Amino acid sequence: SGDPTFQELLARVRGADLAAFENQDLPFERLMEILDPPRSRARHPLFQVMVSFDATSGVSFDVPGLHAAEYAVRGRESAKFDLNFELREQYDDGRPAGITGVVEYATDLFDRGTAEALAARLVRVVEQLVSDPGLRANQVEVLTAGERELLLTGWNPGARAVPDATLPALFEARVRQHPDAVAVTCGGDSLTYAELNARANRLARTLVERGAGPERFVGVMLPPSTAMIVAVLAVVKAGAAYLPINPALPRQRIDLMLDDVEPVLVITEDVVADGSAADLTDDERISPLRQGNPAYLIFTSGTTGRPKGVVVPHRNVVSLMRGTEDLYGFGTGDVWAMVHSLAFDFSVWELWGPLLHGGRLVVVPADVTRSPADLADLLAAERVTVLNQTPSAFYELIRTGRRDLPLRWIVFGGEALSFERVQEWYATRPDSAARLVNMYGITETTVHTTVLELDADVVSGARSAIGRAIAGLAVYV
């Protein structure tokens, strides 16, 4: 802990080692019995990296008629640990002559190049500490200049120019381009871009009259429907941020959210407002709407068990769409399925993705989302091209056996993806045109942060992966 010098750290390690020797008579079997660590045939139960130092190498002795010296024998065919650094002090005529070392590594985890790079970093660290024992831990350079450049820039895409616009402004631009195109459907209901925009504008004016505006919150507690989409658009057009509330939540949980946020009002039913259908201007809002103003607030489970509200500004959502547009090439011909609850941040991607690209949004009724077979029927009937799924939901969709889905993109998020489970998709649908993508992110970073496009070769790898940062973001490990 802290930021000790190398000398201070060495003293700490020495003290810990001497204290450990007090228990050197404890049998290993007894130690394992006490600790009872999780067992796996793939690794040592207590540690996976070992560093050993032999200061007795080079010892020799002579007896009459015989000279004896050490001879190193390395005959293990398999590594006992993930990594094993064996360092040996060398002597020349009894005088110290440097240190040599061997790196033993598990080939199913590391390739030769990686093992050599790790060894080189160890040497680099030791050389710095020997030359200046007063160096503090945070002053030690582990990476070469080239490695640092690769980490900071090579593995992170460059920033993209993000339009200085808000969500309603970008949506209204699509309305002007495609007013008669269908914007949203749910069951038998559908609205064109012009109709959706007009209804949202009328409701937005009503919300402004009741106090909604920038830096304020409006609850949206509606079931999946076209009315829910109208309400969300109306809130952001008014300049406020929407607070999605799942009507199925326990009353206590809803009260907790309302007490925490104190929204100016909550929309709980389909409201057909009167008034002008024209787009709102800043003159009509209680204050100007800017990119930095909150667009929505979503509650997460929180690390403490108490739900935590996360506020996300318009800029972040606009940046997300801008950073992924070259990858996906979303357009007016795409049909998106909104499968997730508005209170789950995956819905941000599902809702704004189609509306900001001029596509069609299909709001999936709650009962359909709970039935993989019914969902598959809807995807086929609505000709959905973009499907966003948690991995667990996708595994169930695979089990339906449907091979007639017109999907162009399947985007994963919300939980860890098992490459092994996804192999079944490629094995049973070799001719599918759908491209699968694994994305990772958290609510605080606006839905998605990293992206990895999959194929049969990628998912046949040994472990899952989350890919690289999307354009405009950077990821550090």
Image: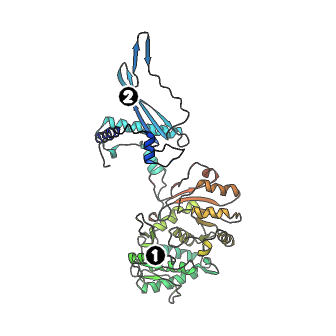
Q: Earlier in the sequence, mark 2 or mark 1?
A: 2
- The residues tagged by marks 2 and 1 sit, at their Cα atoms, a distance apart of 65 Å
Q: Position of residue 377 (x, y in %)?
A: 68, 71
Is residue 278 shown to the viewer in this render?
no
**Residue drawn at the location 67% of the way across and 62% of the way down:** 399
Foreground mark, 2 or 1, reads: 2
Callouts 2 and 1 close, C-beta under 8 Å: no
**Label 2 is placed on what type of residue?**
Ala
Left or right of residue 109: residue 55:
left
Camera-side residue of 24 and 8? 24
Farthest bottom residue in view: 274
Name the disc covering residue 55, or none: 2
Q: Is residue 7 above or below residue 308?
A: above
Q: Is residue 390 above or below residue 459?
A: below
Q: Position of residue 305 (x, y in %)?
A: 42, 66
| Residue corresponding to mark 1 | 243
Rate crowding at label 2 as few (under 14), some (14 to 19) or many (20 or more) other CA atoms within 10 Å. Answer: some
Camera-side residue of 265 and 419? 419
